[in-house]
Image (cartoon, rainbow, N blue to C red):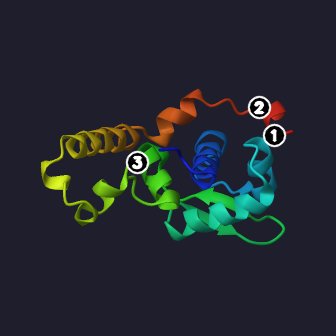
């Protein structure tokens, strides 16, 4: 399983807002896109999805941009990834057990489910306040 480009960009956007802005501050769209190396056209799509999920607010106009709506300490990596990419499943038999008649008795099925649960738990235990402490917000990054 590989995180989609949209999921990766969503994580970058939220990380920037958590690390490089103060609570309630609006970060200009262009600034976020440049600092986190996200194409502006893709940034707009990702921002719409994050907005619909209630994670960020999009402000229009000359002073427009993005504002984080959730406390970074209460916002997990899992929430952001699944807001963009949907619920994480490692394969079809986990997503739709009825798609495989072997699921109830398959040893591999149980391994996939355990791996899925552990991955989701790891992402859920990782909050953006913790990640933000490791992020460097510098003028160089914004250029």
For mark 1, give the secondary structure: helix
The total number of labels drawn is 3
> Which one is in front, 58 or 87?
87
Q: Earlier in the sequence, mark 2 or mark 3?
A: 3
> Which one is in front, 44 or 143?
44
Whole-angstrom CA distance, mark 2 to mark 3, is 25 Å
**Residue 70, x across and y down, in percent:** 48, 55
For mark 2, give the secondary structure: loop
Q: Are marks 1 and 3 in contact (CB under 8 Å)?
A: no
Left or right side of 72 for 137? right
**What label sits on residue 2 in the rendered view?**
none
**What label sits on residue 74 in the rendered view?**
3
On the question of residue 76 being in view, the answer is: no
Q: Which quadrant of the figure contains the C terminus?
A: top right
Left or right side of 79 for 9? right
Mark 2 = which residue? 138
Please tell me which residue is depicted at 67% across the width and 59% down the height of the picture: 66
Q: Is 20 placed above or below 68 here?
A: above
**Dot 2, how many residues are within 10 Å of its Cα: few (below 14), some (14-19), or many (20+)?**
few
Query: Residue 86 occupies which quadrant of the picture?
Result: bottom left
Mark 1 = which residue? 142
Please tell me which residue is depicted at 62% across the width and 46% down the height of the picture: 22
Query: Residue 124 occupies which quadrant of the picture?
Result: top left
Q: Is 67 placed above or below 123 here?
A: below
**Residue 23, x across and y down, in percent:** 58, 50
**Residue 18, x across and y down, in percent:** 58, 44
Please tell me which residue is depicted at 12% across the width and 49% down the height of the picture: 105
Q: Residue furthest front?
A: 101
């Amino acid at each position: 399983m590989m995180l989609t480009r949209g999921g990766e960009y969503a994580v970058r956007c939220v990380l920037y807002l958590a690390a490089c802005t103060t609570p309630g501050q609006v970060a200009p769209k262009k600034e976020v896109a440049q600092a986190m190396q996200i194409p502006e056209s893709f940034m707009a799509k990702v921002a719409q999805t994050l907005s619909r999920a209630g994670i960020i607010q999009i402000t229009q106009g000359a002073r427009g941009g993005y504002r984080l709506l959730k406390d970074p300490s209460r916002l997990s990596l899992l929430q952001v990834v699944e807001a963009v990419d949907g619920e994480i499943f490692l394969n079809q038999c986990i997503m739709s057990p009825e798609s495989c008649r072997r699921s109830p008795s398959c040893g591999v099925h149980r391994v996939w489910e355990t791996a899925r649960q552990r991955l989701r738990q790891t992402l859920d235990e990782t909050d953006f306040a913790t990640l933000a402490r490791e992020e460097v917000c510098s003028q160089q990054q914004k250029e």
